Amino acid sequence: MENVADENWQVLLSLLPSRWREQAVETGAIRRLRGFASSESLLRTLLLHIAQGFSLRETVVVAKLADLAAVSDVALLKRLRNSEEWLRCLCVDLLQENGLALARAPVARPFRIVDGTIVKEPGKTGSQWRILYSIQLPDLVCDFFEMTSTRGQGNGESFRRLPVRPGELIIGDAGYWSAAGIEFVQQRDADVLVRVNPQSFVAFSPADERVELLSLVRTLSQSGQIGEWPIVLRGQESRVAGRICAIRKSEHAIQQAHRRVERKASKRQTKTKPETLEYVKYVIVFTTQVRAPAAEILEWYRRRWQIELVFKRLKTLAHLGHLPKHDEGSSRAWLYGKLLVALLTQKLIRVGRDISPWGYDLHTAASEHVA
């Protein structure tokens, strides 16, 4: 008789893409099983390490006790490294299933999303690491991964830490709003699309007059109304020309945003500033891409925001776990594994209200039934 853990595992398997076993072979994650009973045992062992936060040594002990695998921690690290492409493919398939259309940007250029998070390893004295990574769309290929200490100058989130190639469009959230970082990208013949941080917004008109951001966006009085304004940023070495593009949210979205702001203020026991309640009525971005219409620019950022919902769960999951620090390959595989867990969580929430009373999807169970 299956125990609860095994039953829960079967539910999780029902959420995986239909070809997950075949992809394990096609991507080279499994050439020989050696030490693992099946591709299912391998995946379950990897998730013990990635999702449960066990170290490699802890994982192999737990896996052996559960009759999942009989391998060393070194062998498991190699398996993790070899599973990088497999885990990435699973993430891409799940993103598509979850309703995120990862069509390429409507311009013939590389399209990258930059993000970062802090990983705290288990224990009172667990180390903290800052991870900065860049993922291409629509392939979700992690083309840059850097891990540094959370302490020390130059270790924060910044475009200046990225290897930038000419012709790219790099998208970042408000944490990357910095004239120096934007200047860094433009000097390398690439473009940025970044959420504006109103608290640190300093910009000028083409006539060199100080721009009042709130005065601009307040002209958008109707839900869905879009506006754009040319501005100039003053970098450390040069001036950066670009556009502010903004859209007013729906009234329902504004009410939700106000509630979030007030809950945060209540939790921190602070008073919300009136301008804060005004700014959350809009989505405001800056871009150095001057050819595309404002609506198209905002649509590109909307794609970034959709995947940001996944990243938010990833960041929550990443706070606990033993990040492999041996090489970039194993670290990227670990990151894809975290993304996979976040996407499975998202899918479980989405289908949870439709799942049958017996706790699993009938169609998936029927396809795996053995007479």
Image (cartoon, rainbow, N blue to C red):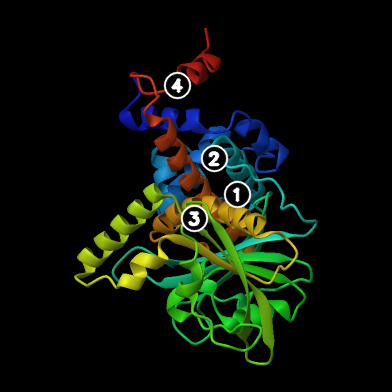
Secondary structure state at the residue bearing disc 2: helix
What x and y, as percent, mark residue 234?
61, 88
| Amino acid type, mark 4 | Asp
Depicted 197 relative to depicted 115: above or below: below
Q: Going from the N terminus, do you reach mark 4 or mark 3 first?
A: 3
Mark 1 or mark 3, whichever is nearer to me: 3
Task: Tell me how far mark 2 sits from mark 3, CA to CA.
Answer: 25 Å
Q: Which residue is mark 4?
A: 361
Mark 4 or mark 1, whichever is nearer to me: 4
Task: Tell me how far mark 4 sits from mark 3, CA to CA.
Answer: 27 Å
Q: Which residue is mark 3?
A: 311
Looking at this rendering, what residue extends furthest in the top direction?
371
Instruction: Locate the N terminus by quadrant.
Output: top left
Instruction: Name the image quarter holding residue 226.
Output: bottom right
Depicted 79 relative to depicted 361: above or below: below
| Amino acid type, mark 2 | Leu
Q: Which residue is mark 1?
A: 79
207 with respect to 94 (left or right): right
29 with respect to 313 (left or right): right
Task: Tell me how far mark 1 sits from mark 2, CA to CA.
Answer: 8 Å
Say if mark 1 contacts mark 2, CB within 8 Å: yes
Depicted 355 relative to depicted 344: above or below: above
74 with respect to 262 (left or right): right
What x and y, as percent, mark residue 250?
44, 50
* Residue 41 seen from this side: yes
